[in-house]
């Protein structure tokens, strides 16, 4: 489509010209204007393909109109036909100077108009095509140039990487000795990183001796116009180690054909030289090998020994090598065994002149004892005749070590039982056999109940002794073909490879539980340790070892939930429990980052004065999908996964932050108790964390009380006591939580700086009904007061309970009788209300 703009102040002329233009070619669109300015506005917005204009118009002359058109970007180069009744050449020159392309005399001949318009439109169309193609060519050329430049850049970068990767010192220097390039190996060797190498001579950068020597060598290359090879030199690297370099120098020619650079390539051949020296030394040693070798050497011909060195005789228990030579055959020195085929006399052609691969043989010493030797044999010439030389090394000790390592890799060091790796291997074999022969098998996953408390209380040596006795009892309950393995910690597995049905596992389980009903005697102590057992049956509960072990493990946890000292078969429902645990863990991992944890505060009240003594910081978890969760749902999982360390640190930091804020807002000074997990209790690390949090929020140390359990306190008494004393010197208080439920030795209590004992809520709950619990409560209070330790009762819910412990001298209490755990704002309101009303009074 071609756009033709016609400008003529005479409407009749405009109509005629429009008709002529439409007849010029089929795809013409014509826009006519009687006013030049209106035409200019249109042309500015719509680039035309041809402009036809009258030369004499009242608003603007044709010359002015053409000049204005040529100033518009949209009319640059567009052909312009001038229609005029004047034949004067002056008019034409003015129009041409302004930018006109053609002239037509008025009145216009239609055929002439169409021809000229068609020619100009065709010419303009081709000009536009040429411009477009030229633009495309320009873009393609620019893209090609960019691509070529990028290729050059990548090539240079790859070349630089190659040069910097080559394990050789590479540099280029100018004729004057100025350094032009160093690769990274060169820089590292001379420790030149950061030096302005591009303006320095070799003598400036490498020192006078090395630099001058290489400048002289460069001059030789320039003078000869040829490379220099195999220049060996010894110098010291940046670590002052002596290194040997093998250097090659070559000339590099410039565009003018003249040498303008010298390339120096130096290979570090230190190790090769050392190797060569080692070979020379080895050859020297080899010459004296026969006389004083640490290896036994024997030479035989036709199976008869004709020479032996003293080491060979000593290995086999003979005093004199001549005793070996006197033997009719070497066969009597070698014994057949399950792992050795015995001695076979070497045959010609069987061995080459190089030593054979080493093989091991079981041998018999002169005194009848057995040893293992490693033998290599080769063909030699001995006294001008063909013979075989064997070198022999005594590997008896190594074999013993290998057997020990093999046992360590597959057996538990404490109990001597197969370990997890060997157990899984045997279980895989048992599953394959069961599938092939269509019978069943059982996997028992056994966990010792309360083992950790015994281990923490009486030490690891006692714990290991208990594990050995437990292993012996389990072994006594199974068949010879069954496998008893220790998986780690206090976990065992029993593989029953051939049973008729799942019910056949129960007699074994009952025997094991019965065996554990008797106490274990540990030094002077008696310990009652029971077992929880999970059972999976193959192929019903799985057809691979990992699944069967996992399912038996899940069943074992169900047995523990049912009260321990029992067993449970695996069911599909347990997979749901395992999946729920994984789902919970998936959310727990991100809970800190997503700010899902919050601290609630449960008041602790002085029973006698009714004053608010402090509060305990209790963790809560608010998850958008799982809802609000109490600690008992997620803290055990956090303990198992180790997440409790980061969570506990956050709780400690938050508690100190609240203490600092309350102190600044004028709240009465309180002691805030924070629970510390055994995973956090890592001595100096915890001390540093506490000190940092107190300083960060400006909290006096005596306002913070750390609560730890008895088991945590006794797990590593030496380190724990040191950390506790450090915290005590800082002024931080310490409370022993859940007192009365653990196994700690009371004799240690007086050695530790404990400020408070917290009576476990299980004793408080039954203190009015159970005489035993009441006795424990009274004993704890009396003992603590004798040691100067205050007593806190947990879980006080009834006024009768509170009155009971008050009469017995208990100092502090917390529980629902005062308040449940409250959010921070609610706790502040509760404190204010308590201070006003002292709602509880005896």
Image: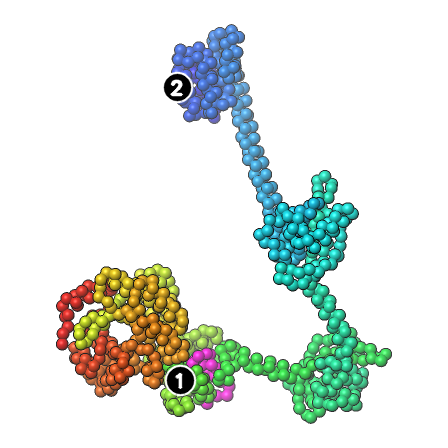
Look at mark 2 in the image and give the residue it sits on.
38
| Picture residue at 24% right of the left edge, 77% below the top | 793
- Give the answer, above or below, for where 625 lies relative to 20: below
Left/right placement of residue 138 relative to residue 543 reads: right
Under circle 1, the secondary element is: helix
Pick the front one: 85 or 235: 235
- The nearer-to-camera label among 2 and 1 is 1
Residue 480 image position (x, y, % from top left)? 50, 88
| Picture residue at 66% right of the left edge, 82% below the top | 395
Residue 621 image position (x, y, % from top left)? 31, 65
Look at mark 1 in the image and give the residue it sits on.
458
- Give the answer, above or below, for where 41 lies relative to 839: above
Q: Does 480 lie within the magenta span?
A: yes
- What residue occupies the far bottom of the structure in this picture? 367
Is residue 510 shown to the viewer in this render?
no
| Picture residue at 41% right of the left edge, 77% below the top | 719
Which comes sooner in the sequence, label 2 or label 1? 2
Instruction: Characterize the local packing of mark 2: few (<14), some (14-19) or many (20 or more) Cα atoms within 10 angstroms.
Output: few
Under circle 2, the secondary element is: helix
Pick the front one: 508 or 819: 819
Q: CA distance from mark 2 to mark 1?
A: 107 Å
Q: Does 434 lie within the magenta span?
A: no
Q: Report which quarter residue 706 is drawn in.
A: bottom left
Residue 374 image position (x, y, % from top left)? 69, 80
Q: Report which quarter residue 722 is drawn in.
A: bottom left
Residue 816 image position (x, y, % from top left)? 20, 72
Pick the front one: 539 or 820: 820
Screen quadrant of the C terminus: bottom left
The span picked out in magenta is 476-494
Say which mark, if any, is on residue 8. Answer: none
Left/right placement of residue 726 relative to residue 274 reads: left
Instruction: Characterize the local packing of mark 1: few (<14), some (14-19) or many (20 or more) Cα atoms within 10 angstroms.
Output: some
């Amino acid at each position: 489509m071609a756009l033709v703009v016609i400008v003529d102040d005479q409407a009749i002329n405009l109509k005629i010209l429009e008709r002529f233009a439409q007849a010029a070619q089929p795809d013409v669109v014509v826009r006519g204007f009687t006013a030049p300015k209106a035409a200019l506005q249109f042309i500015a917005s719509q680039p035309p393909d041809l402009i036809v204009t009258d030369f004499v118009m009242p608003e603007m002359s044709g010359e002015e109109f053409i000049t204005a058109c040529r100033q518009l970007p949209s009319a640059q180069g567009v052909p312009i036909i001038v229609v005029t009744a004047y034949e004067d050449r002056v008019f034409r020159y003015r129009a041409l100077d302004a930018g006109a392309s053609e002239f037509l005399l008025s009145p216009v001949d239609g055929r002439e108009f169409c021809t000229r318009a068609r020619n100009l439109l065709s010419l303009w169309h081709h000009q536009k095509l040429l411009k477009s193609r030229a633009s495309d060519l320009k873009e393609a050329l620019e893209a090609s140039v960019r691509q070529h430049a990028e290729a050059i850049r990548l090539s240079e970068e790859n070349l630089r990487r190659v040069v910097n990767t080559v394990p050789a010192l590479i540099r280029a220097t100018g004729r004057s000795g100025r350094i032009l390039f160093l690769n990274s190996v060169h820089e590292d060797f001379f420790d030149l990183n950061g030096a302005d190498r591009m303006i320095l001579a070799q003598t400036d950068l490498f020192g006078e001796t090395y630099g001058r020597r290489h400048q002289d060598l460069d001059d030789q290359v320039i003078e000869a116009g040829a490379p220099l090879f195999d220049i060996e030199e010894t110098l010291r690297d940046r670590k002052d180690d002596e290194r040997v370099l093998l250097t090659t120098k070559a000339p590099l020619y410039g565009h003018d054909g003249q040498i303008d650079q010298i390339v120096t390539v130096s290979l570090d051949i230190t190790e090769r030289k050392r190797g060569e020296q080692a070979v020379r030394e080895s050859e020297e040693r080899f010459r004296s090998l026969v006389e004083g070798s640490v290896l036994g050497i024997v030479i035989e011909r036709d199976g008869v020994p004709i020479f032996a060195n003293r080491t060979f005789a000593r290995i086999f228990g003979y005093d004199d090598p001549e005793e070996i030579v006197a033997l009719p055959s070497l066969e009597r020195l070698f014994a057949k065994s399950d792992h050795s085929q015995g001695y076979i006399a070497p045959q010609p052609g069987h061995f080459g002149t190089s030593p054979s691969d080493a093989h091991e043989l079981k041998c018999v010493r002169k005194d009848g004892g057995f040893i293992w030797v490693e033998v290599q044999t080769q063909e030699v010439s001995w006294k001008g005749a063909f013979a075989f030389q064997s070198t022999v090394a005594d590997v008896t000790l190594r074999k013993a070590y290998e057997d020990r390592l093999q046992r360590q890799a597959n057996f538990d060091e404490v109990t001597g039982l197969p370990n997890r790796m060997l157990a899984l291997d045997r279980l895989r074999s048992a599953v394959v056999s069961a599938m092939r022969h269509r019978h069943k098998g059982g996997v028992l996953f056994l966990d010792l109940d309360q083992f950790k408390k015994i281990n923490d209380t009486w030490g690891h040596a006692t714990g290991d002794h208990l594990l050995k006795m437990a292993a012996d009892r389990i072994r006594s309950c199974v068949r010879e073909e069954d496998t008893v393995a220790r998986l780690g910690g206090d976990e065992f597995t029993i593989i029953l490879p051939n049973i008729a049905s799942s019910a056949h596992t129960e007699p074994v389980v009952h025997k094991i539980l019965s065996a554990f009903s008797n106490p274990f005697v540990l030094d002077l102590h008696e310990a009652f340790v029971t077992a929880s057992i999970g059972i999976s049956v193959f192929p019903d509960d799985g057809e691979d070892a990992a699944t069967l072990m996992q399912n038996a493990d899940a069943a074992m946890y169900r047995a523990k939930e049912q009260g321990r000292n029992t067993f449970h078969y695996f069911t599909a429902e347990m997979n749901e429990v395992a999946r729920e645990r994984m789902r919970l863990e998936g959310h727990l991992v991100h809970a800190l980052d997503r700010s899902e944890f919050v601290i609630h505060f449960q008041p602790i009240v002085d029973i006698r004065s009714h004053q608010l003594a402090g509060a305990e910081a209790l963790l809560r978890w608010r998850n958008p999908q799982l809802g609000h969760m109490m600690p008992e749902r997620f803290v055990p999982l956090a303990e198992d996964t180790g997440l409790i360390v980061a969570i506990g640190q956050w709780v400690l930091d938050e508690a100190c932050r609240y203490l600092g804020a309350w102190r600044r807002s004028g709240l009465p000074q309180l002691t805030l108790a924070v629970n510390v997990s055994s995973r956090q209790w890592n001595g100096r690390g915890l001390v540093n964390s506490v000190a940092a949090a107190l300083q960060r929020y400006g909290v006096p140390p005596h306002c913070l009380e750390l609560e730890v359990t008895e088991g945590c306190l006794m797990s590593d008494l030496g380190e724990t006591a040191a950390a506790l004393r450090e915290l005590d010197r800082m002024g931080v208080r310490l409370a022993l939580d859940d007192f009365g439920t653990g196994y700690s030795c009371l004799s240690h209590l007086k050695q530790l700086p404990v400020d408070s004992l917290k009576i476990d809520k299980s004793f408080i709950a039954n203190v009015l009904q159970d005489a035993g619990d009441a006795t424990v409560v009274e004993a704890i209070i009396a003992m603590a007061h004798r040691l100067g330790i205050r007593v806190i009762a947990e879980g006080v819910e009834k006024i009768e309970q509170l009155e009971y412990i008050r009469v017995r001298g208990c100092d502090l209490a917390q529980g629902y009788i005062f308040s449940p755990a409250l959010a921070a704002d609610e706790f502040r309101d509760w404190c204010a209300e308590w201070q006003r009303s002292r709602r509880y009074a005896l």
